[in-house]
Amino acid sequence: MNESSCSVGDYFRQSWGGSGALFLIGLFLRLALSNGLLNQFIPYTLPGGSIVFKIHIGTVLILTAFLLRSKKIYFPQQFRAVGRSSYAFMLILVYATIWLVLQFGISSVAYLVDTFFCALFGALYLLNARRVVAWSAFKMIVVFTGINSVVAIFEFITRAHFLPDPGFRFYYFRSYALFGHPLLNALLTGVVGIFVLRDRSLGRWSLLYFLLATIAILSFGGRAALVMFVLVAVTSELIDFSCRFFAGRATWKHLITMQIATPVLISSGLFLLLETPLGERFMAMKGLDDNSTGARLHLLSIYDGLSKSDVLLGISASTKRLLIDQNSNFNTIENFWVDMALSFGLIAFSFIALGMLVFMYQVARSGSTGSIAAGIFFLLVASTNNALSIKSPALFVLVSLLLAAQRARTHPQR
């Protein structure tokens, strides 16, 4: 009894004491406090207001946790490449931030801090975090995303949003759930769903979690996310099964199970798409004439009329907004690569893109095949929307999920 009590006490002291508490609270706040929710109280993404209101409180706590532990920074052998790529990407971002400030002022600094620097500080912290902190972070992300999926499905059934209306307008009902925006929801839900399935994080419940995530993505109306979600999951599962089967580590029972389960899951998915309201927005793609699809097809037309110096050196946020308003093909840039290239210019953007890709590659390869599958899904889907060209926890959640799982893999109960 006393031994058990001590173990429980040690668990809470190690995970919720000092920098561990700050990191976990910061992680929770980044998950729970969406842009739209914060805008109800402070001008977080709205014009005006103090710089104090422009940085997410979760980011501040994560940075503080990193600084408290920075004197103890040491990269284990398996994470040294991640550590080096993190510092390299951070250095690139620092120079890019200075470049942006010198050209256009400090208006975009908060975006870089919340979207990119937060992910880097989170990664560097987790590389040296206690295993119990990493395990707590991993469980928090999986549980919160699962709850978010349930909320999304409930919203779609009741046709009512759980949180205050952030002001988005769509032709079809789309769940906002707790992450606040359908595209961000679909991206994060897909990342966690694929990782849990491939990593078998929940044992026999992993497939059920994956199916829950699938229905949630339908509720969000994330078309590209759904296609990539199914494609990446099925492809990675088939590759893994083929390797195990030809290596003699899979049985005929597994093969028969896959042959039965595959058509059942495909039929169920087609039924949801064709015979239920969940498929409304997906059926709008038949003629490729809905606004969202058209916006992606005509995206590069925004470069028409830009001078060479604008293309190479970047344009201000106000100029970019003017270009969007003058373009009849779309009202937002649904590709973060294009958006960032416009803001930073092709010269600076080339270094940023290279730094981010190397950083993501090192994070993914440091883990399991689930990490690689989740990283591929993230990159594919993020390239079809603007989740990384606005203040977003997307990259932070991805690297936290993958690194926390890898860090906690050995003796997660400690």
Image (tube, helix red, strand yellow):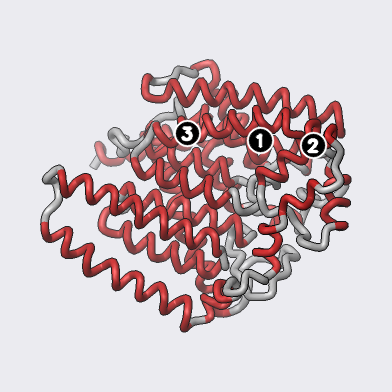
Nearer-N-terminus badge (3/1):
1
Which label sits on residue 361?
Answer: 3
Query: Which label sits in the foreground, 2 or 3?
Result: 2
Task: Estimate the x, y position of residue 403 in percent, counting from the top left.
Answer: 44, 35
Q: Is residue 274 above or below residue 161?
A: below
At label 3, the amino acid type is Tyr
> For this rendering, which residue is in front, 292 or 102?
292
Task: Describe residue 329's horizontal placement relative to residue 283 as left or right.
Answer: right
Residue that carries the numbered disc 2 in the rendered image:
311
Gap between marks 3 and 1, in whole Å? Answer: 26 Å
Q: Is residue 391 above or below residue 102?
A: below
Gap between marks 2 and 3, in whole Å? Answer: 28 Å
Task: Estimate the x, y position of residue 13 in percent, counting from the top left.
Answer: 43, 34
Nearer-N-terminus badge (2/3):
2
Nearer-N-terminus badge (1/2):
1
User: Can residue 250 be seen from the camera position used here?
Assistant: yes
Q: Secondary structure at mark 1?
A: helix
* Picture residue at 46% right of the left edge, 43% below the top: 375
Q: Secondary structure at mark 2?
A: helix
